[in-house]
Structures are given as C-alpha cells and as structure tokens.
Amino acid sequence: MLIRWLLAAVHLLGYGFALTAIIGRTRGLRRLPGLAGLQRVFVADNVWGITAVVLIVTGLMRVFGGFEKGADYYLHEPLFHVKMAALVLILAFEIAPMMTLIRWRLAVRNGETPDLSRARRFARTGHWQAILLVVMVFAASGMARGIGA
C-alpha cells in the first residue's frame, strides 16, 4: 500500500515539475538573447529530461509492475489511450529540440557559437508540449474517477 501511494505521488509530482521545466525552457528559448541565455535553457532542458524519465518509469511501474490496477485495466481504458497518445506526441515533438540542444551544448563546450536561429520554433513546440501534458493530467484524473470507462 505504501509503495502504491509513493509511486502515485512521485508520478503526480513529475507532472508539475515537467510542466515547470517545459515552460521554463520555452520562455528561455523565446527570449534567447544569445549565448548568455543558453545556460538557463540548458538547466530547464535537463530538468525536463529528468522529469520525463521519472514520469515514464513510474508510469510503467504503475501499469505493468503490479502496483496498481494492472495492465489489463489500463489497456482497456479509453482515457489511458488518450494519455498515451499525448505522451507519444510530446516525445515526437521532443526529437528535434533534443537533438539541437545536444548540438548546442557540444558547440558551447568546444568554444563555438551555436546557430540559435531555430530557438523560437522550439519555443512554439514547447507550447504544444505543455498543452499535451495538461491533456495527460486531465486524462489521468478522469481515469482515477472512472470517467470514460
């Protein structure tokens, strides 16, 4: 019982931290003045990456680890499919920013100036990711209350 509660709490906290990190990275990218603002973007990106891993690991443990209702319940729950579709879209949206931010980190580490021309585009991507994360929270809370079953 205690582990179920802790997994649920960590999973829910992960959403808050993930949303904060996405918004922080998005704001940093939108207002990026140049190299001076990159460190803030990198920190927010690191937090976003860590919280994404926490959300995925705790989610997998809750669905397939025998700690919650079980995979059969979740796999037949329509809102779970909405939640997973939102996750897939978030991860798909993340590919280009992730690869670019890795290149930017390497360039900065090598004393080079990265091409920051795509920063505003990635800020728009962050807006969509934040919206999809909120969709995930609504789907999860609906599942917890038996909506859509």
Image (tube, rainbow, N blue to C red):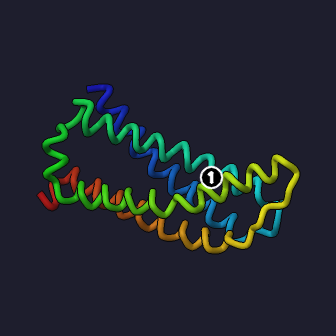
Residue nearer the viewer, 20 or 64: 64
Residue 13 screen position, x and y as percent: 45, 45
| Residue drawn at (41%, 64%) of the image | 132
Q: Residue furthest top?
A: 2
* Quadrant in which the C terminus appears: bottom left
Residue 112 screen position, x and y as percent: 86, 56
| Residue drawn at (32%, 33%) of the image | 5
Label 1 belongs to which residue?
45
Query: Is 138 left, or right, of 39 in this rendering?
Result: left
Relative to 143, residue 11 above or below: above
Residue 95 screen position, x and y as percent: 53, 58
Image quadrant assignment for residue 55: top left
| Residue drawn at (35%, 57%) of the image | 137
Residue nearer the viewer, 111 or 64: 111
Residue nearer the viewer, 125 or 100: 100
| Residue drawn at (22%, 30%) of the image | 66
Please rate how many residues cluster around mark 1, counting C-alpha atoms within 10 Å: few if below 14, some from 14 to 19, many from 20: many
* Quadrant in which the N terminus appears: top left
- Asked which secondary structure carries label 1, the reply is helix
Number of dots carrying numbers: 1
Query: Is 109 left, or right, of 93 in this rendering?
Result: right
Query: Is 16 left, or right, of 3 in this rendering?
Result: right
Under mark 1, the amino acid is: Asp
